Amino acid sequence: MIYPSIDKILNTVGSKYTLVHVASKRSKQMRETGHIQMKEKEYVSKREIGRALEEIEKGLIKIEKD
């Protein structure tokens, strides 16, 4: 099972396309800079894409709508 649940995240994001776009940008940012917003032990996922999704779920990533 994927953690965090995509269905739960879509309630806050609204669109699968927006979710993919934001998660991929954050994942790339983590890979390039090494900056993470939570403590290493708090993440369930080991990979950047999973960690990006966790940050979105916890509200650490704010998505601005036009």
Image (cartoon, grey):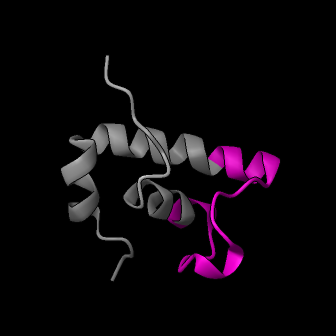
Report the residue at 50% width, 58% height from top: 55
| Count of number-bearing discs | 0
Report the residue at 66% width, 82% height from top: 41
Q: Which residues are magenta?
A: 28-50
| Residue 49 is a magenta residue | yes
- Residue 19, position in %: x, y? 36, 45
Report the residue at 60% width, 51% height from top: 27
Report the residue at 19% width, 52% height from top: 11
18 sits left or right of 11 in the view:
right
Seen in the picture, residue 25 relative to 8 is either above or below; the reply is above
- Residue 57, position in %: x, y? 38, 60
| Residue 61 is a magenta residue | no
List the single residue furthest toward the right.
33
Instruction: Answer with the quarter of the image where residue 58 lies.
Output: bottom left
Instruction: Answer with the quarter of the image where residue 53 lies.
Output: bottom left
Seen in the picture, residue 43 relative to 24 is either above or below; the reply is below
61 sits left or right of 39 in the view:
left
Seen in the picture, residue 1 relative to 58 is either above or below; the reply is below
Residue nearer the viewer, 8 or 17: 8
- Quarter of the image with the C terminus in it: top left
List the single residue furthest toward the top.
66
Instruction: Answer with the quarter of the image where residue 4 lies.
Output: bottom left
- Quarter of the image with the N terminus in it: bottom left
Residue nearer the viewer, 9 or 20: 9
- Residue 37, position in %: x, y? 64, 57
13 sits left or right of 55 in the view:
left
